[in-house]
Image (cartoon, helix red, strand yellow):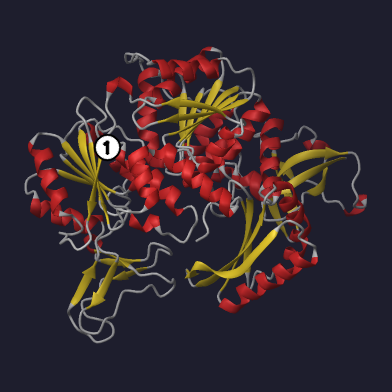
Amino acid sequence: MAIVQVAVAAPLAEVFDYLLPSQEADCALGQRVLVPFGRSRRVGMIVARKERSSIAPERLKAIECCLDREPLLGAEDLALIRWAADYYRCPPGEAIFSALPARLRRPVPSAPAPSDDAVPFEPAPSPTLNAEQQAAIAAVHEAQGFQCFLLDGVTGSGKTEVYIRLISAALERGRQVLVLVPEIGLTPQLAERFAQRLDTERVVLHSGLTERERERGWQRAARGQARLILGTRSAIFTPLPDLGLVIVDEEHDVSLKQQDGFRYSARDLAVRRAQIRDCPVLLGSATPSLETLRNAERGRYRHLHLRRRAGGAEPPRFLVVDVRSQHLITGLSHALLTRMTTVIEAGNQVLLFLNRRGFAPVLTCHDCGWISVCLHCDARMTLHRDRGLLICHHCGDQRTLPVHCPECESPDLRPLGQGTERVEDSLRQRFPGIPLARIDRDSTRRKGDLERLLAAAREGAYPLLLGTQMLAKGHHLPGVTLVGILDLDHGLYGSDFRATERMAQLLIQVAGRAGRAEQPGTVMLQTRHPDHPLLIRLLRQGYGAFADAALAERAEAALPPFSFQALVRADSRVAQRALDFLREARARVLALDAGPVQVWGPAPASMERRAGRFRAQLLLQCAQRAPLHALIDRLLPSLRALSNTRTVRWSLDIDPQESL
């Protein structure tokens, strides 16, 4: 019997040798199999064939059966996943099965791909391209094989039209195209634009689909039936036999990095996938990440610019509202309310941005000072008055809204601060009879709610729009001429060194909703820090100047992208155990002679207790990637030997994007 290597659906660092019985001789690489594993059975995938095994033949177990009629993953797909598993130090079986639709991670036969019914197609008219758009399209067309492009375009500059023209050309050449977006909320609008202009079979892949829907779309893409694939980060692993172009929209967005389990960056894997396939990849953003800008500076990526808004629209005008010592009405200044009235009376739309859902971030007792603290996290529970609940936005714990104070039984419980629910209540009182749409995770819980609200907003049905970042990113709202940003000050002094970068990106993205049609737009930014130097540079000189200054600061501090990091995290129900594990890990690092690798910590996480577990972290940093990864290779066996999952859980995050 032949010998094959099988990656088992389990967090194990190795693959296992099995015998391939004669009745399963047709099993090939990329097919799922059912194998005996210990005292149970597990789903696995064949990843290699071998002539010999280091295990004695009589000790080798045989595969029980093959679950697929044909391979689910080709050699190129396996190469990408195994490269990613190696780079991000993820067990191969965990990586491979994370890349499959959820249903295919279980021992069930793979389903067929039924095609969607054909829909009559009447293409919408194509807008006229400006010179910058034409130059960007020509540059990608001229690429021979793999090349990475950064499409750096101000909001409203027509990046989507560049995508459509490039996709159309790739489809005409008989190629498939993969388009990645960071969040589900961005897929409906892009899907609609593609449907209006591109006559091709397409699928949308994201976590909001049922298991069956996702598997059917995945199968249609894998078998070449679907030619255009639009999805969130996990779509990067979708098998595409005719892939000819990869596009990553909003490449700067942190949502493109998986934060648990298989901790990969979909943006970085998009570049690697295009490299393996030898095709171009386009990274698009109005606010490129500093890592991507650094790659463009070094000549690794070709930098394409769209500096003007499409159709002749003017960039929005910024007005800074210093709210220090001002009386605010539910977080709204007099100046902002006055401007809102003028805009609404003129028949235009106002968009207010507050990245805090719920009614209020805390509930307190006016008599004894009790506050609504989560029992499981170092965080306060948010008041959601519409649902009559206190909810922790970190662990998800919920409590019924109390009538009396749990400490002193006083009935005088008061909300402090404001979330989108509370601002909505205030606006309805201030602007009675004016249609208002609140768009956040709470108001769009049901399937189709987000699409319905956004479609109505684009048609001008709501003069008042209020929302979180769900409303801020990538949406074309032609009637909006005023954007009010209620509070972004936390990003100016955040504990994470990326806080100012994220603040700047969000501010520019939100501001980009204003004045996208014929009428000019205005952005009013409420702040208690109007003299912050980075904020002044951002508003006066634009994101490019801000990024230059931020890169200079990072270089001086030797922080990414001028260094490389790996974060070892540990958590336990006993705080000391997580820290003790990381102290021992630090000792192992130093015993290995870390060389140029710096070791920081261990230290408690910014939010030490979350979901009842105490968290700590150990940071490894080096000016070069190779020494850091070489040290990690030597360290991992020690960490695995140290670990006792009954008392401490630990994980390794390569190129971490968050340190909270």
Query: In x, y percent, where is residue 42?
Result: 69, 52
- The crowding category of the residue bearing disc 1, from other C-alpha atoms within 10 Å (few below 14, some 14 to 19, many at least 20), is many
Quarter of image, res 196: top left
Rendered residue at 29%/54% (across/down) = 487
Count of numbered labels shown in the rendering: 1
With 528 as the anchor, is 301 left or right in this view? right
Query: In x, y percent, where is residue 182?
Result: 45, 41
Query: In x, y percent, where is residue 637?
Result: 77, 61
Q: Nearer the viewer, residue 204 or 379?
A: 379
Rendered residue at 61%/73% (across/down) = 578
Residue lying at the far bottom of the rendered structure: 408
Q: Is residue 509 visible?
A: no
Q: Quadrant of the N terminus?
A: top right
Reading the image, the residue beneath label 1 is 454
Quarter of image, res 271: top right
Q: Nearer the viewer, residue 327 or 640?
A: 327
> Does 324 appear above or below 577?
above
With 533 as the anchor, is 312 left or right in this view? left
Query: In x, y percent, where is residue 109?
Result: 61, 39
With 638 as the anchor, is 373 left or right in this view? left
Q: Nearer the viewer, residue 548 or 334?
A: 548
Q: Is residue 150 visible?
A: yes
Quarter of image, res 580: bottom right
Residue type beneath disc 1? Leu
* SS state under label 1: helix
